[in-house]
Image (cartoon, rainbow, N blue to C red):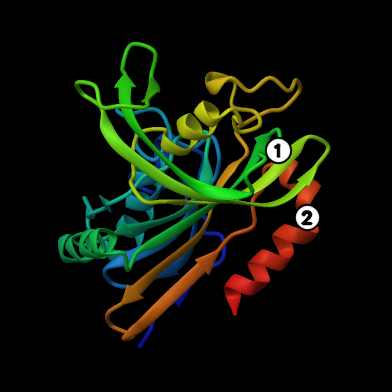
């Protein structure tokens, strides 16, 4: 048997975790099995915060599982994350065994993710691989990009391809080979093509709210069903509307 596909989940007011938050979940659970969930995280919602009074995805999922299972402190395990300004798909474990399996799949490449981004500018090279070294500037909450290894830096690699261009912007599909702090945002900016709306990394175009980046595709192997499951989501950032036909075509291809 496979998992359960969901639409938007809404929490009752008397949820043990939900008293602090709006009772409507911002996280959308797309798919559910006994060991993991596949979720859409909206832009602006943190995956996890240290504050007990700020809504985050983990708290919303604990809410949901608490109501569903009756457990006071249900397990929610993260094996990968998204930055708070970034929207996209995440696989989240709801058992320790599920977390171990998702971690194995992430390590061996069975859990795969792809991103769509709108870049400022149009790269002359339509596709390529970026390989750099990244270190974290904790004081300014930034990733620093280096061409050569420096103390504290870790290797970072991604591949990209430009799908379409319009009005000085480019639609790019990006695949991470490593998972580093702010990796896509930092490496694309270092290349000279920051993500639209990403002021932190040098975006210049005025009047854009939010970072135009979406983890739109996620594939993993579901052990119970004995097959690969793939999921897609449509980006909600308004700049993706510039490339609506190409995005729609891509989503249809991935659903096949």
For label 1, the residue is 122
Q: Residues within 10 Å of mark 2 (few under 14, many from 20)?
A: some
Tell me where residue 132 sits by quadrant: top left
- Image spot of residue 239 (x, y percent): 74, 40
Helix, strand or loop status at disc 1: loop
Helix, strand or loop status at disc 2: helix
Q: Residue furthest right?
A: 167
| Residue 26 visible in image | no
Of residue 126 and residue 15, the one placed in the foreground of this image is 126
Of residue 118 and residue 10, the one placed in the foreground of this image is 118
Q: Is residue 67 above or below residue 155?
A: below
Tell me where residue 104 sits by quadrant: bottom left
Horizontal placement of 43 versus 181: left or right? right
- Image spot of residue 129 (x, y percent): 46, 47
Horizontal placement of 134 versus 250: left or right? left
Horizontal placement of 256 versus 186: left or right? right
Residue under the image location 42 percent in, 62 percent down? 38
Residue under the image location 21 percent in, 50 percent down? 73
Q: Is residue 84 above or below residue 160?
A: above
Question: Which numbered disc, 2 or 1, marks the residue closer to the eye?
Answer: 1
- Image spot of residue 46 (x, y percent): 43, 36
Of residue 82 and residue 42, the one placed in the foreground of this image is 82
Q: Residues within 10 Å of mark 1 (few under 14, many from 20)?
A: some
The quadrant in which the C terminus is found is: bottom right
Give me the C-alpha separation between circle 2 and circle 1: 18 Å
Residue under the image location 50 percent in, 27 percent down? 190
Tell which circle, 2 or 1, labels the residue nearer the N-terminal end: 1
Q: Which mark is residue 244?
A: 2
Q: Which mark is residue 84?
A: none
Tell me where residue 133 sits by quadrant: top left
């Amino acid at each position: 048997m496979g998992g359960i596909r969901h639409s938007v989940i809404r929490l009752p007011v008397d949820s043990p975790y939900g008293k602090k938050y709006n009772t409507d979940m911002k996280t959308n659970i797309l798919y559910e099995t006994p060991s993991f969930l596949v979720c859409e995280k909206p832009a602006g919602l943190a995956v996890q915060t240290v504050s007990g009074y700020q809504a985050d995805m983990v708290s919303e999922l604990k809410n949901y599982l608490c109501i569903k299972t009756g457990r006071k402190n249900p397990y929610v395990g993260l094996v990968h994350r998204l930055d708070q300004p970034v929207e996209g798909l995440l696989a989240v474990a709801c058992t320790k065994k599920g977390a171990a399996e998702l971690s194995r799949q992430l390590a061996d490449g069975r859990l795969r993710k792809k991103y769509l981004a709108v870049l400022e500018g149009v790269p002359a090279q339509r596709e390529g691989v970026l390989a750099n070294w990244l270190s974290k500037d904790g004081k300014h909450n930034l990733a620093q990009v280096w061409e050569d290894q420096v103390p504290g830096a870790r290797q970072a690699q991604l591949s990209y391809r430009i799908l379409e261009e319009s009005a000085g912007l480019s639609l790019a599909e990006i695949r991470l080979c490593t998972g580093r702090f702010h990796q896509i945002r930092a490496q694309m900016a270092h290349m000279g093509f920051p993500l639209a709306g990403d002021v932190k990394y040098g975006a210049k175009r005025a009047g854009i709210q939010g970072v135009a980046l979406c983890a739109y595709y996620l594939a993993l192997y579901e052990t119970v069903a004995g097959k690969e499951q793939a999921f897609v989501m449509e980006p909600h950032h308004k700049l993706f509307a510039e490339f609506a036909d190409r995005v729609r075509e891509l989503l249809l291809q991935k659903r096949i």
